[in-house]
Image (cartoon, rainbow, N blue to C red):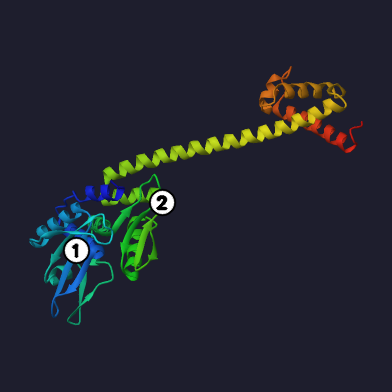
Amino acid sequence: MSFSSKSKNELARIRTEGKCCNRAELSGIIRVSGALELGGFQKMNLRITTENPAVARLIFILLKKTYQIHTEVIMKENKILNKHHLYEIFIEKANDILLDLEILNLSEGSMVINDDMPNALLKKSCCKKAYLRGIYLGGGSLSAPEKSYHLELITHNDFYANRLVTFINTHFDLTAKVTPRKKNYIVYVKESEKIVDFLNIIGAHHTLLEYENVRIIKQMRNNVNRVVNCETANMNKTVEAAYEQMSQIHYLEATVGIESLPEKLQEVAYLRMDNPEASLKELSELMNPPVGKSGVNHRLKKIMKIATDLQLKGGKI
């Protein structure tokens, strides 16, 4: 089961007692997953569709608790995706509900779609959270943290999407952004810490814990990989440097002999030949008496310079 499904199943089990929160949550769900249909003069029907049966059951319960409406949940085949069922709730003559939830507004005696936030429903902190939970239940998705950190809320209106971003960032500081995609507008959050905050705000606490566990393990693996990569890079540099040093020492041995070098340089040259994979630190500890790492490096550089100068002179001192 995906993280989106897990989180929605968890959220759909939340039951708020306050009618204000029920209205806010229902308004959020309908805003992103509802469709309005003309049912005659000044009559609007409402059709709510979801792929999640737990969300469909929650909508049924919210409608019954808030408006004493007994509806049916109809299961249909999803012809578009061809792999999930669709669950549909249809309400005939839903004007009063749509006006109460601020999906519609009255303007000069006519009903118009409200593209703004339902501000009258969002006066309390608990209602703001319930509304955001409804938006997620109706049109949200959450990527598995093993793959990427990405949370989306799908909306259908440019103005509303930007108002939703302002609402989320003003009240919850989640650094949400909006981007167009085909005919929709996607409000998204990409920072893992902010996604965790979002899950906490809407009440998906079990999903949050699972998400955090995966995120921590992923972060630990990334840290280990970075350390390994760093150590591998350093090891490669050590091997490459040692190979170059060995090459130059062998050149000196074949031309003028290592014995021609000063005594201190001879000791380092022989140690390097006997310990081709040793680091500078390890070579310094093998010196008798021990010499600092910088001292060993200085002597090897001298040997390299002598060999280079000798090569420029054609192998003659």
Residue at 73%, 24% (x, y): give it: 272
SS at badge 1: strand
Q: Residues within 10 Å of mark 1 (few under 14, many from 20)?
A: many
Q: Quadrant of residue 60?
A: bottom left
Task: Name the amino acid type tagged 2.
Answer: Glu
Tell me the residue at 40%/38% (across/down).
217
Q: Is residue 33 above or below residue 275?
A: below
Is residue 24 visible in the rendered image? The answer is no
Instruction: Indicate the secondary structure of the residue bearing disc 2.
Output: loop
| Residue at the farthest bottom position | 108
Amino acid on which disc 1 is placed: Ile
**What residue sits right under mark 2 in the picture?**
191
Location of residue 131 with respect to 205 vertically, above or below: below
Residue 109 rendering spot, x and y as whole percentages? 17, 81
Q: Nearer the viewer, mark 2 or mark 1?
A: 1
**Residue furthest toward the right?**
317
Asked which quadrant contains residue 104, the reply is bottom left
Q: Which mark is residue 186?
A: none
Q: Is 180 positioned to the left or the right of 84 in the image? A: right
Of callouts 2 and 1, the N-terminal one? 1
Residue 279, percent from left and from top: 66, 28
Front in this rendered view, residue 203 or 154:
154
Q: 194 or 84, which lies in front?
A: 84
The Cα–Cα distance between marks 2 and 1, rounded to whole angstroms, is: 31 Å
Q: How many marks?
A: 2
Q: Is residue 143 left or right of residue 16?
A: right
Percent x, y for residue 44?
Answer: 15, 74
Residue 2 visible to an observer of this rendering: yes
Residue assigned mark 1: 48
Q: Residue at x 80, y 24 (%)?
A: 265
Residue 15 appears at what percent x and percent y?
16, 50
